[in-house]
Image: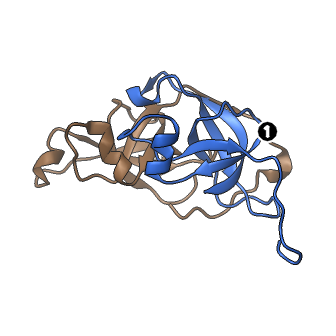
Chain colours: A blue, B brown
Amino acid sequence: MLIARVIGELVATQKHPSHEGRKLLLVQPLNLDGSNRGDAVVALDAVDAGIGDRVLLATEGFSATTSVDRTRAPIDMSVIGYIDQIELLPGVS
Amino acid sequence: MYLGRVVGCVWSTAKDSRLEGMRMLVVQPLTPELENTGKRIVCADCTGAGAGEIVYWVRGKEASFAFLPAEPPVDTTIVGIVDSVHLKRPAKNRGRKANSC
């Protein structure tokens, strides 16, 4: 799982039926210091997240599909939670 | 899933029998600002996407689930055609970084 920030939404009318009824979010994975970690990705929304939220991103098939109640669906990323706070040991950044 | 733009087609005659009739498209990965990033890849397609369209694609074993009950040996599949992108992020974070895709 990765820490990420929701930076946008996608609109797609023609898509795989298993993606119907869930928001498509553009999320930017982040490092612990808040800097960007690679390029932004598209994820299905399991928690009703909005633009600007810091979230937990599942980046593997099983966790991504089960979190949106769609098993054996072509989904490899989903937003599975909000992050309220991250606490680190001293010296870790 | 990742954003991309369809930039070409691939024809293949001798291939795995489960790939018969399947469209193979060349996709250029994109940033949310719709700038090119990373190298082009070949994707199977379950949406009927055409040249120049912006799409999103899925990677890994889940790519073959788009064609259930068949499970063709594909590892990247286009699963949606993007109508519009609503983007909102601070300008300072828009710097691109190398993509591993």
* Residue B7 pos. (x, y %): 42, 44
Residue A27: image quadrant is top right
Mark 1 secondary-structure assignment:
loop
Q: Looking at the image, can residue B33 be seen?
A: no
B47 or B38: which is nearer to us?
B47
Is A16 situated above or below B5?
A: above
Q: Residue at x 74, y 63 (%)?
A: A31
The chain letter under disc 1 is: A
Residue flagged by tag 1: what amino acid is it? Gly
A90 or B48: which is nearer to us?
A90
* Residue B101 pos. (x, y %): 50, 60
Q: Looking at the image, can residue B42 be seen?
A: yes
Q: Residue at x 34, y 54 (%)?
A: B75
Residue A8: image quadrant is top right
Q: Is residue B49 left or right of residue A43?
A: left
Is A49 situated above or below B96?
A: above
A59 or B78: which is nearer to us?
A59
Q: Is residue B39 left or right of residue B25?
A: right
Is A54 situated above or below B97?
A: above
Q: Is residue A4 left or right of residue B30?
A: right
Q: Which residue is mark 1?
A: A52
Q: Residue at x 70, y 57 (%)?
A: B96
* Residue A69 pos. (x, y %): 46, 34
* Residue B3 pos. (x, y %): 54, 43
Q: Residue at x 67, y 43 (%)?
A: A81
Number of numbered discs: 1
Residue occupying the far bottom of the picture: A91
How crowded is the residue under tag 1: few (<14 C-alpha within 10 Å), some, or many (20+)? some
Is B93 situated above or below B45?
A: below
